[in-house]
């Protein structure tokens, strides 16, 4: 038996898909061993003593927020459909 309405499930599903696509995009922007796509946006211009630029730090923060949203929507969908 479902706990939520079909409208709520549809809205959360659409949001979940959008967050998952955003998360895929953000992960692909991260620099790997070879530099990665983050250099396109200035990630490889200059590294300070900390070892990462402001762009990379912001990309890390945005990726963490997107992953938390993905986890929350996954749990919410599991609760709605269970």
Image (cartoon, helix red, strand yellow):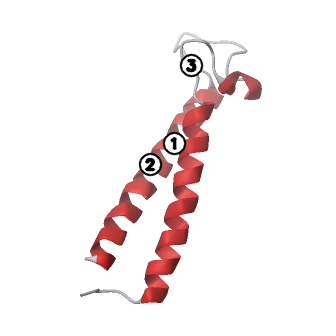
Q: Residues within 10 Å of mark 2 (few under 14, many from 20)?
A: some
Task: Residue at 44%, 57% (x, y): give it.
Answer: 69
* Helix, strand or loop at mark 1: helix
Residue drawn at the location 44% of the way across and 48% of the way down: 67
Compare marks 2 and 3 and give the one earlier in the sequence: 3
Q: Tell me which corner region of the image, top left, top right, bottom left or bottom right, holds residue 76.
A: bottom left
Residue that protrudes farthest toward the front in the picture: 1
Q: Position of residue 23 (x, y in %)?
A: 53, 46
Pointer 3 local density, CA inside 10 Å: few below 14, some 14–19, many at least 20: few
Pick whichever of labels 1 and 3 is earlier in the sequence: 3
Determine whether the residue tagged by mark 3 lies in a helix, strand or loop: loop
Mark 2–mark 3 Cα distance, whole angstroms, equals 21 Å
Dividing the image into 4 quarters, which one contains the C terminus? bottom left
- x and y, in percent, of residue 26 in the image: 58, 40
- Give the number of the disc on residue 67: 2
Give the image quarter of residue 75.
Answer: bottom left
Residue position marked by numbered label 3 in the rendering: 52
Disc 1 vs disc 2: Cβ atoms closer than 8 Å?
yes
Instruction: Examine the rendered structure and indicate whether residue 8 appears above or below residue 15.
Output: below
When the figure is inspected, residue 47 is found, relative to residue 1, above or below; the finding is above
Q: CA distance from mark 1 to mark 2?
A: 6 Å
**Is 46 on the left-hand or right-hand side of 10?**
right
Q: CA distance from mark 1 to mark 3?
A: 15 Å
Mark in front: 1 vs 3 = 1
């Amino acid at each position: 038996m479902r706990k939520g309405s079909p409208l709520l499930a549809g809205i959360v599903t659409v949001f979940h898909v959008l967050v998952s696509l955003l998360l895929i995009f953000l992960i692909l922007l991260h620099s790997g061993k070879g530099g990665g796509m983050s250099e396109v946006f200035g990630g490889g211009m200059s590294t300070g003593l900390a070892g990462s630029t402001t762009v990379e730090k912001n990309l890390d923060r945005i990726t963490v927020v997107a992953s938390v949203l993905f986890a929350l929507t996954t749990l919410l969908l599991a609760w709605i459909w269970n």
